[in-house]
Every structure is written in structure tokens, then in C-alpha cells.
Amino acid sequence: MVQLALDEAVADAPAATRLLAAVVERSMPAATVDIVAGGEAALGRLLIEALNALSSRKVDAVILGGVHSDYDPLTIQALEESGRLFSPENLDARIPGEAAAFFVLMRDADADRKGLRALARVLGVGTGRERAGPHDDAPAYEAFGLTSATQQAAVPLSRSGQTAGWMLTDLTGEMRRLREWQAAFVRVQDVLGRPYIIESPAQRIGYLGAAAMPLLVAMVATAWAHGYAPSPVAIATAGNDGGERAAVVLASPARRSEREEWA
């Protein structure tokens, strides 16, 4: 099973879907392909579907990922015309970026049989929806969608009394999303703890689009694998222009328990 997120504003989503599905099917003829043009939040929906498919044993493994690129003249023009292109005179905006990231999700037992070592474990996933968007006057500080998504994903932490000391976001320089995140951050303090490390890669390497959540998962897994992660539990959040929000709670493989079954 292959699940791939594309940006919301893909000019010809059906054609892109057909092209990408054909590429996947050439290398993995038996795989089913699910492609969603849901931008940064698409992985929330896809990850829930993946976990359900694995728990029902419909599949043995799921490849999840996302791709994004702003390096196109029409994309840059659209960002500039909408006032969302970063410049020294326009800080409330996005730095153009490009990224692609993928990871494989499996049940522990199947990974063990294949001699594979887990790099991270999924503890919880949540989704929500915001009223505020880039082109309306709804208050970003409501943050009901992001708060709900994070609280859903963090239920296993609340039940076990654990906290996450590391939070990763898809935030760019746009103040609307920053205000939303600040409000949600205050409301989920019960599941956050030291060292309170917060990272927003898009502020350094450019807007990540549909690749945002897969890249955050890959960053966390890589940090645990190489021993430089600041916390054994992490929360990653993302959201798209359409109002969808997604959150996932991840744990280091070293914290394996009965509740942590996804590699």
C-alpha cells in the first residue's frame, strides 16, 4: 500500500495522480496507490487509514510520503500576487521551498520477522479543522482544529502520564498560523514537558507543502537513530490552507510498550 500527499493547489491533480500511480505500479505491481491533494494536512487522514489497514491485516506495510516544489515561475508569481512571497519588506510570508520525504509503516511483528529495526513508533494521530484561512477574517487564535488534532493524538500520553519534550511544526513566517499554533500550544501543556524544544524547519529551508509531515517524521526518526534527539517523545503538527489540521505523536523505539505497536 502506497499513500502519497500532494499540494492542495496541484494544477491538474487527476493527471498527476495517474502519472504517479503508474510510476508506483511499475516498481510495485501488487501495491494499491492512494494519492491525496491535501497539502500539509493530508498525512493525518492517510496515516489513520494506514493504521486501520495494518491493524485489520489488509496489508503488511504502508509507504507514506509527500512531495512539494515552489520552483516554478507560475507558483512564484501566484505567491507574489497573493502577498505570500517572503522578502525583507514582507516578513509575514513564505520562503519558497522544495522537499520530498517518505517512510514505511509496519507492525512490530512483521518488521521483526523481516529483520528490520524500527526507527520510531506511532503513538497517536489526530485531525481537526480550523475556520480561519489565508483569505478571511476569522480569528486565528480560535485554534480549535489544531488543538483538537493535538489532543486526539496525545491521548496515549495523557493516559500513561508521559510528556513530549520535542514539538515540530510546519510553520513558515505567516503570522496567522503562528497565532493559531500559540493558542493550541497553551492548551496542550499537560502533555508537554522539558526540554520544550520547538522546531519549524520551513522557517529555515523554505515552505514544505505536502512534504511537511513526512519530513518531520523522517527528521525525528533520524535523530533517534543517531542519538541526537532532545526527547524520546515528539509531537509533529501541520495544516493546510483549506483548514485541515493534523498531529502525530511519535516515540523512540527505546520506549516500546504494549501501546506502541507501529514501527
Image (cartoon, rainbow, N blue to C red):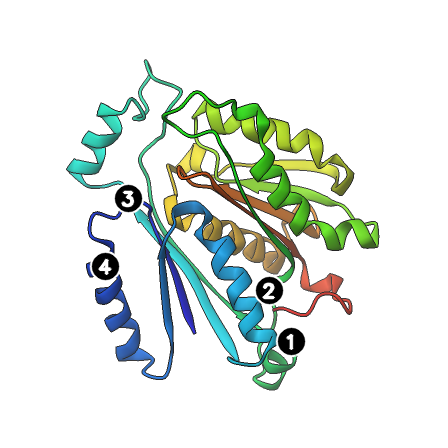
Q: Amino acid at mark 3?
A: Ala
Q: Earlier in the sequence, mark 2 or mark 3?
A: 3
Q: Earlier in the sequence, mark 4 or mark 3?
A: 3
Say which of 23 and 149 sits in front.
Answer: 149
Residue 65 coordinates in the image, percent (x, y): 42, 59
Return the mark for residue 119: 2
Secondary structure category for the residue under label 3: loop
Q: Earlier in the sequence, mark 1 or mark 2?
A: 1
* Residue identified by numbered label 4: 14
Mark 2 in CB contact with mark 3 (< 8 angstroms) = no
As drawn, the residue found furthest toward the right would be 161
**In the image, is residue 104 above or below residue 89?**
below
- Density class for disc 2 (Cα within 10 Å; few <14, some 14-19, many ≥20) is many
The residue located at (61%, 75%) in the rendering is 55
Mark 1 in CB contact with mark 2 (< 8 angstroms) = no
The residue located at (57%, 38%) in the rendering is 146
Hey, which quadrant is residue 167 in on the image? top right
Mark 4 in CB contact with mark 3 (< 8 angstroms) = no
- For the residues labelled 4 and 3, the Cα–Cα distance comes to 12 Å
* Residue identified by numbered label 1: 108
Q: Amino acid at mark 1?
A: Asp
Q: Amino acid at mark 4?
A: Pro
Q: Amino acid at mark 2?
A: Leu
Mark 4 in CB contact with mark 2 (< 8 angstroms) = no
- Front: mark 1 or 3: 3
Quarter holding the C terminus?
A: bottom right
Secondary structure category for the residue under label 1: helix
Residue 222 coordinates in the image, percent (x, y): 55, 57
- For the residues labelled 1 and 2, the Cα–Cα distance comes to 11 Å
Q: Earlier in the sequence, mark 4 or mark 1?
A: 4
* Residue identified by numbered label 3: 9
